[in-house]
Each structure stands twice: as C-alpha cells, then as structure tokens.
Amino acid sequence: MYAQSDLRDENPERLSVMAISNDLRTDMSLASTAVLGILILVILLEVPQGVKAAPSWGLDGIGSPLTTGHANDIIILVASCVGCYTGQISSVIDSSGLTFTQRANYTDVYFQIWEYYAVAKSRLSSDFVTVTWSHLNHGKWQVFAVHGYGGVHFDVSSPVTVSSGSCVGGFLGTCSATLETSGRDFVFAYLAEPDIGPCSLAPGWTYGYSNGYSELDYLVLKAPSPSVQFDCNNIETYSPILMDAILLRPG
C-alpha cells in the first residue's frame, strides 16, 4: 500500500496517461465488437434463410440422344412427313425402355403429323429414340422432355389442335393456330414444313429447334389462358401446325 501511495504522489502524469490508455483500449474493444456484430448481421441477412427454390418446370431437354436433368418427366415425340399420306409409323423404340403411346395423328393430302408420349420415372442420359416407318423413308421426328407435369399428362380441356389452311400471305406469310387451355400449361407448337428458316415468333414464345423440314416452339403459361395463339411469321411455305398443352402442377 505504501508503494502505491508513493506512486500516486510522485507520478500523477504517468497515472493519467495510463488511465487514458486504458479508456482508449476499452473504447476500441467496444467499437471492434460493434463492427463485428454489424458484419455478422450483414452476412446473415445475405445468406438465404430457408427460402424454397422455385420449381424448374418446363423444357428439360430436347434432341436424340436425350439427356434430362430431372426424374418424372413426360417425354414427347413429334414426327412428320411430306408427300406421304400413305406412310405410317411402324414402331417407336427407346434405348431406356420407355413405352410410347400415340396421342394424335393428322393426315391430309400432303402432310402427316404424329404425336407420342412416355413417362420417364428416372433421369435420362444419352437416351436414343428410334422411329421405324412403313411405306416411307424420309420422315422427320424430334423428342423433348417436360418437367413438372401434373397428375394427368395433358390438359384434359385442351384436345390436340391441328390447324390447316390457316396460312395467309403466301411466301413469307403467316401460319397460325389457336389452342384452348384451362391451366398452367406447357404449350408447344409443331410445324411439319417451315422450309429453310425458323419462324419469326411473337413475344412469349421460345424457339425450340428447326432442321429445315420441321420446327418446334413452346410457351410456358404463368396463369391459365382461355386461348393461346401461335403465329409462325415469315414462313416460306404452307404448313399445318400441331398444338398441344401439358398440364403443369400448380405453383
């Protein structure tokens, strides 16, 4: 105690500096703690807090071989031929063992269009689809996968539509088709003969593929629509259009 009393009596300036230094260290420690707390809060705010991811419903792969990103997809096969009104599809064989069921067949004096579907319970990897024909050697086909279909495969209120004779303007004119829907649907349109160039599409429609002899385009409805119209603008030659709607699960 005596030594402490002497220190206070003989070095008052030193004690004052020590007190100020201690206060500064305390203030800096408090400030650092506050800054650290703010940084932790910012990090927590930026990290997703259990937000449910939006379902990736819609096109899940196109082409043969077909590779998909999800299980439980509906697989659509569309095929067509020109100048082949007597031709038929003999079989559809899938390398993964999928069984395809015919949904539609349209025939006029010049075109034929077919639609088949199957359900893939697991993801597909390099899946090959082989179509064999009778009385025909130049048919075209394409396969694609749609993820998120509901308890029924198709919108039951939307029967397949095939529009023929709805082309106006001749060369570089417009061919149109309309489909009634009642749900949140994946709608696609298939043309048997868009000739060389792809369609010029209206807003909302997405180009799927075109090989110069057929074309596939699609639209995902965010809400039910009583009528969906597809227009292929700047088409080079007349073509019938097949439209269909796959009913997606509510979301």
Image: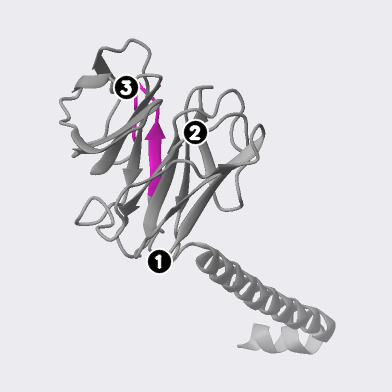
Helix, strand or loop at mark 3: loop
Q: Give the range drawn in magenta.
A: 58-68
Q: Does the magenta stretch include residue 66?
A: yes
Q: Which mark is residue 176?
A: none
Q: In this view, does 34 lie above or below 127?
A: below
Q: Residue 126 carries which label?
A: 3
Closer-to-camera residue (185/214): 214
The residue that label 1 is drawn on is 224
Is the Cβ of the residue at disc 3 closer than 8 Å to that at disc 1? no
Closer-to-camera residue (107/12): 107
Residue kind at label 2, given as amino acid type: Ser
Residue at 59%, 68% (x, y): give it.
36
Q: Residue 239 carries which label?
A: 2
Quarter location, residue 185: bottom left
Residue at 25%, 15% (x, y): give it.
133
Q: How far apart are marks 1 and 2 (CA)?
A: 27 Å
Q: How far apart are marks 2 and 3 (CA)?
A: 31 Å
Residue at 51%, 45% (x, y): give it.
166
Residue at 50%, 67% (x, y): give it.
44
Residue extending farthest right: 13
Closer-to-camera residue (225/240): 240
Quarter location, residue 122: top left
- In this picture, residue 87 sits left or right of residue 83: left
Nearer-N-terminus badge (2/3) = 3
Please rate how many residues cluster around mark 1, counting C-alpha atoms within 10 Å: few if below 14, some from 14 to 19, many from 20.
few
Residue kind at label 3, given as amino acid type: Ser
Helix, strand or loop at mark 1: loop
Query: Which coloring applies here?
Result: one colour
Helix, strand or loop at mark 2: loop
Residue kind at label 1, given as amino acid type: Pro
